[in-house]
């Protein structure tokens, strides 16, 4: 198999995007379109008892108002082991402020907005709502622990111990592309255009809610203007809009305003991490106890146990005890946001490791290098590849770590600015999903590749093109990549960094089958030119091949699940090995002497993501991850006023994300060693791990600069005054 | 539809006439960067918009006489780009160039800037964000409704000048610099022209936080005048915020020093981000008079500037931050243009 390093190539959609020509889901123009606006509840919990719609219907242009009675009853949860129910549509029970209780349909967007604002329902509010994880009424629900060896016993042998609690705040994704759904019903088929990382998930959720058969539904998500997990799970509005389109017989489009996105979309829940690490007399970590919990809705599914996964894979702890819990309160359901579990957990754990290294008077890089994980201690299997130590060594070299003086506050600039150098590592699980791809090369010069994948800007189209163009002599300018479309190929949720590793092996195999098919077609004829010319010469309009890739450890059962619209993820714990991606971040922070402003002029990040398929988009993923980590560490938090529930700073002016002026130089490099077994190209995954650990490197840098240990993000200016 | 009329008169007299004719629902509009935003948030619901941008002669910038003059309609970006100001009055240039974004500064006028409204989260979460419509009471939006910010997430709220009815911060940067520099405001109204100190444009919140400005009905801002002073050469506008660009101040300080050798003969100090109106810090100015600028003196002046500050629940840090921001600004200003 071909696993040579790949050359740098421009991003395939760069020109389209820079010119504003790229088409997103909400751009689709349909004749006879109705515009929709949701009407959100302004109570934190309770019931809507009456929805007078007359005032809305009197607004010129308003066509119809749909309320709970217009919708089919919610899908009941399947029994244990079954899939979670799809998000409910419109119900009179209000679980959180901002939950929609009606949708207004109108000839213009302005009329829809005005109609929505005209609706004043009657409420029966439940004033005993639980807004925060420590408010009365929260319910703590522990899940299964994760254990290796006997941490309690090993802890008794520890000579040095560190224990502390670390906190990661509630945060919201704010991709520039808003959540939207456009749907129309024609000839017995419902077509949905939506910015989603999971056309299959949208299809499933809409189908189940509206009781449609799979062949009655097509979902298309051609291009996503930022997903980051917000668009990875079924969105609440999809089935509501689809149902409105079916009832009215007209296309319906809804674009959620940002304030409603804050209140309805998934978000990163507040999480708390209590970590205890014990080291023996030689200064080696021998025992770890880790207890994590997070904010959860009353019925949410986002699991807490994954916080416990990364640390043992980085250090190979043989005595480890991890416990985790949901803390159920009255909020919308939290969910996946870039590096969902490893970002908060590696912030916590890598801060704790730094604290312990300091207690032991060891250099934090050298201390990490003394702990090498060669096996997955939880499952007692080898890692298929683990270059974390190479990342640390290479990062230290590029950063100039050997010039660091250890004592906090010992490095300063002439104006008194305190300089801090921090390091931290990260790990992210590698998953692979089945894929069924078709490749067609045509004599007319065009090529079409259809498979399961979604382009959220991460560059998946560039990786597919990279492989096809290297393997086949085809015209890259006329290559169509049909992805994010349930009518083109079976789709999965493209998330968790499994997109590339699940599609490029299929592209590679399709290319080699294409070569074989062509060789068979040509027989012993000698025909020149590229593939298109060759087909034309032998008067063959087109040649197609189909490939089915099933990840290691899976079989027909998982393939069938995928074909029926379900998810069938393999990894990171494969039958004979475990696979994680790794990264090391080195961060320089400057803390101003008087006002204590924190700046981050320089970051060096070295990633082990297996083979790098598209160097340009890969580097850009790491820069994006590092930028977000700095933003998460220093800036971002969504605030709840507990007297009212909901989210207070629910717009881009007041939810503070980093701007260009906050970000300095980011030096990105890769180990670029293919994983020997996880898939044919040795691709592990990158988009998520890029961010992991970097927030801890910022915290560790701040400690090195100031001697102050910050354990709760974000570190806003008041924390250092 | 919330219908409103729109007029674009070409003279100040015609604008005033249109305003008087339209009555209480009338608003002037210049760059629109505040007013349209507040209309979308349903905080402002004017019935008549009188666009003043077609009036000629109100965008002139004159920086050569005893008085620096800025026409009310001059864009923020144009004033910030003035060469003389850049050299001789960094305090004015920085107050403009550290505000908003380049795109906004191209639209926004230096007159409209003085009349922007608070960024208090509870004030802005009016009916325009449907999920929060009518949830948070605000005396500024709805007189007598109560103030959700007092016992709420008050991290951004004022520590100086607040009343029981309101602790919202006066958000602008430019007004802080103007107040520090003794600027005058030129107004024209149905009764004729008048001039007031910029500092007198702002009303303390008291029991009537919805009344923010001392403008009379239909009065139009025509210009801003700043007395020329060599203190401008030793000046700065220092702005500390939650990110390094595109954010309002958590604490800011406008400082200009008239130096005789290294002795302060006259000091201008005003604070932003911490008070309910642009806050002249006379005690800080006093602390600097006759002194040689040292870090200790700067720190003492910074502490004096925050005299009388009162913390709420989450904004106590602003007292310390404000003092340090003033101290930093004094040191930066003193180091500018060494003789
Ligand atoms: C996203 C964002 C970020 C911002 N960040 C900052 C910041 O960091 N710092 C800062 O200082 N500002 C900031 N601003 C505010 C910005 O500076 C003001 O919106 C702008 O200066 C207002 O000028 P304008 O001409 O657009 O006013 P308009 O919106 O046209 O008018 C504002 C008010 O002034 C009145 N008015 C306007 N002109 C006259 C006149 N000639 N006579 C009488 N009344 C008049 C209007 O009736 C209205 O009430 C920000 C604004 C936005 C939207």
Image (tube, grey):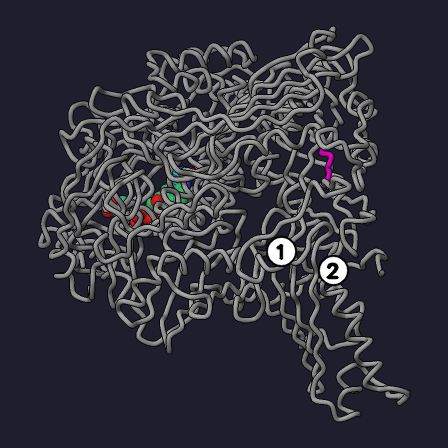
Tell me which numbered mark, 2 or 1, is placed earlier along the sequence. Answer: 2
Front residue (pair B77, B266): B77
Pinpoint residue B5: horizontal percent, then vertical percent.
17, 60
Q: Chain of mark 1?
A: A
Front residue (pair B268, A638): A638
For residue A222, above or below residue A288: below
Q: Residue at x 31, y 67 (%)?
A: A245
Pinpoint residue A469: horizontal percent, then vertical percent.
76, 69
Q: Chain of mark 2?
A: A
Pinpoint residue B169: horizontal percent, then vertical percent.
32, 29
Q: Is residue B110 magenta?
A: no
Q: Residues within 10 Å of mark 1 (few under 14, many from 20)?
A: few
SS at mark 1 in the image: helix
Pinpoint residue B202: horizontal percent, then vertical percent.
25, 31
Q: CA distance from mark 2 to mark 1?
A: 20 Å
Q: What count of labels does the image hold?
A: 2
User: Which dot marks residue A505?
Assistant: 2
Front residue (pair B317, A564): A564
Q: Nearer the viewer, mark 2 or mark 1?
A: 1
User: Which dot marks residue B50?
Assistant: none
Q: Residue at x 60, y 52 (%)?
A: A568
Q: Residue at x 65, y 75 (%)?
A: A448
Task: State which region is magenta.
Answer: A581-585
- Characterize the magenta stretch by its predominant secondary structure: strand
What residue is disc 1 on? A557
Residue B323 can be seen, yes or no: yes
Q: Is residue A584 magenta?
A: yes
Front residue (pair A107, A248): A248
Ligand 1 resides in the quarter of the picture at top left
Left or right side of A511 for B314: left
Which quarter of the rendered picture does the N terminus of chain A lie within? bottom right
Residue B276, by quadrant, is top left
């Amino acid at each position: 198999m071909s696993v040579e390093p790949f050359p740098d190539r421009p991003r395939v959609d760069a020109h389209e995007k820079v010119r504003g020509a790229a088409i997103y889901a909400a751009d689709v123009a349909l004749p006879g379109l109705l515009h929709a606006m949701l009407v959100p509840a302004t109570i934190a919990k309770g019931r809507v008892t009456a929805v007078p719609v007359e005032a809305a219907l009197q607004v010129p242009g308003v066509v119809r108002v749909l309320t709970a009675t217009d919708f089919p009853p919610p899908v009941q949860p399947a029994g244990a082991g079954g899939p979670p129910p799809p998000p409910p549509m419109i119900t009179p029970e209000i679980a959180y402020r901002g939950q929609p209780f009606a949708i207004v349909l109108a000839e213009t967007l302005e009329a829809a907005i005005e109609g929505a604002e005209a609706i004043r329902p009657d409420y029966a509010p439940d004033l005993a709502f639980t807004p925060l994880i420590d408010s009365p009424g929260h319910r703590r629900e522990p899940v299964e622990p994760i254990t290796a060896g006997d941490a309690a016993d090993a802890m008794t042998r520890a000579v040095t111990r560190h224990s502390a609690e670390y906190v990661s705040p509630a945060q919201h994704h704010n991709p520039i592309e808003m959540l939207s759904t456009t749907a129309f019903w024609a000839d017995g088929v419902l077509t949905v255009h939506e910015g989603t990382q999971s056309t299959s998930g949208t299809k499933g959720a809409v189908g189940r809610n509206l009781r449609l058969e799979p062949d009655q539904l097509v979902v298309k998500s051609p291009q996503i203007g930022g997903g980051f997990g917000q668009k990875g799970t079924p969105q609440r509005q999809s089935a509501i809009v689809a149902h409105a389109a079916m009832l009215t017989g007209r296309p319906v489009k809804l674009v959620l305003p940002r304030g409603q996105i804050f209140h309805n979309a998934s978000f990163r829940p507040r999480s708390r991490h209590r970590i205890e690490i014990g080291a023996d007399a030689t200064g080696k970590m021998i025992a770890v106890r880790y207890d994590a919990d997070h904010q959860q809705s009353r019925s949410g599914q986002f699991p807490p146990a994954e916080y416990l996964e990364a640390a043992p894979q980085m250090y190979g702890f043989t005595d480890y005890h991890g416990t985790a819990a949901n803390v159920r309160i009255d909020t919308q359901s939290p969910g996946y946001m870039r590096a969902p579990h490893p970002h908060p957990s590696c912030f916590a754990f890598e801060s704790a490791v730094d604290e312990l290294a300091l207690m032991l008077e060891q250099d934090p890089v050298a201390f990490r290098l003394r702990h090498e994980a060669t096996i997955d201690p939880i499952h007692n299997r080898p890692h298929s590849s683990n270059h974390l130590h190479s990342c640390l060594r290479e990062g230290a070299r590029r950063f100039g770590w050997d010039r660091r003086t250890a004592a906090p506050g010992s490095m300063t600039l002439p104006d008194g600015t305190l300089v801090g150098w921090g390091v931290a590592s990260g790990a992210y699980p590698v998953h692979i999903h089945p894929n069924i791809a078709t490749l067609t090369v045509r004599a007319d010069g065009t090529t079409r590749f259809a498979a399961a994948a979604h382009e959220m800007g991460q560059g998946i189209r560039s990786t597919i093109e990279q492989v096809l163009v290297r393997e086949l002599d085809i015209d890259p300018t006329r290559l169509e990549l049909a992805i994010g479309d349930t009518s083109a190929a079976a789709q999965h949720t493209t998330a968790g960094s499994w997109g590339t590793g699940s599609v490029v092996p299929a592209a590679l195999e399709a290319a080699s089958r294409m070569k074989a098919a062509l060789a068979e077609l040509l027989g012993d004829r000698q025909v020149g030119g590229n593939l298109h010319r060759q087909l034309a010469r032998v008067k063959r309009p087109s040649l197609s091949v189909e490939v089915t890739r099933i990840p290691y450890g899976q079989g027909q059962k998982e393939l069938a699940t995928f074909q029926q619209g379900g998810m069938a993820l393999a990894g990171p714990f494969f039958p004979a090995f475990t696979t994680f991606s790794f990264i090391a971040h080195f961060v320089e922070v400057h803390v101003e002497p008087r006002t204590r402003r924190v700046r981050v002029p320089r970051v060096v990040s070295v990633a082990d993501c297996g083979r790098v398929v598209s160097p340009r988009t890969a580097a850009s993923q790491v820069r994006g991850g590092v930028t977000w980590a700095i933003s998460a560490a220093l800036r971002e938090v969504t605030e709840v006023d507990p007297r009212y529930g909901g989210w207070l700073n629910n717009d881009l002016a007041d939810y503070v994300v980093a701007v260009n002026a906050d970000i300095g130089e980011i030096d990105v490099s890769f180990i670029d060693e293919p994983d020997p077994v996880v898939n044919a190209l040795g691709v592990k995954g990158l988009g998520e791990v890029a961010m992991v650990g970097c927030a801890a490197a910022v915290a560790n840098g701040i400690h090195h600069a100031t001697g102050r240990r910050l354990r709760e993000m974000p570190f806003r200016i008041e924390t250092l005054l | 539809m919330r219908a409103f009329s729109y007029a674009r008169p070409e003279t100040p007299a015609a604008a005033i006439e249109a305003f008087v004719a339209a009555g209480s629902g009338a608003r002037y509009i210049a760059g629109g960067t505040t007013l349209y935003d507040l209309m979308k948030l349903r905080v402002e619901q004017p019935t008549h918009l009188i666009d003043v941008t077609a009036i000629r002669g109100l965008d002139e910038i004159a920086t050569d006489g005893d008085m620096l003059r800025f026409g009310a309609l001059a864009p923020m970006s144009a004033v910030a780009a003035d060469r003389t100001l850049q050299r001789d009055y960094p305090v004015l240039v920085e107050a403009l160039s550290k505000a908003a974004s380049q795109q906004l500064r191209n639209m926004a006028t230096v007159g409209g800037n003085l009349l922007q409204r608070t960024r208090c989260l509870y004030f802005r979460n009016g009916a325009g964000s449907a999920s929060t419509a009518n949830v948070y009471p605000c005396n500024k939006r709805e007189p007598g409704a109560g103030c959700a910010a007092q016992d709420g997430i008050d991290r951004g709220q004022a520590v100086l000048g607040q009343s029981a009815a309101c602790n919202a911060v006066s958000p602008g940067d430019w007004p802080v610099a103007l107040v520090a520099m003794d600027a005058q405001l030129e107004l024209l109204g149905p009764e004729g022209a008048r001039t007031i100190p910029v500092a007198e444009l702002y009303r303390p919140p008291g029991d009537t936080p919805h009344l923010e400005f001392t403008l009379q009905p239909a009065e139009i801002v025509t210009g801003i005048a700043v007395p020329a002073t060599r203190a401008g050469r030793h000046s700065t506008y220092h702005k500390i915020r939650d990110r390094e660009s595109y954010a309002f101040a958590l604490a800011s300080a406008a400082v200009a020093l008239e130096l005789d050798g290294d002795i302060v003969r006259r000091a201008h100090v005003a604070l932003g981000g911490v008070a309910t109106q642009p806050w002249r810090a006379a005690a800080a100015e006093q602390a600097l008079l006759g002194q040689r600028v040292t870090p200790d003196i700067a720190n003492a002046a910074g502490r004096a500037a925050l005299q009388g500050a009162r913390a709420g629940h989450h904004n106590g840090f602003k007292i310390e931050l404000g003092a340090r921001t003033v101290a930093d600004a004094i040191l930066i200003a003193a180091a500018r243009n060494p003789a």
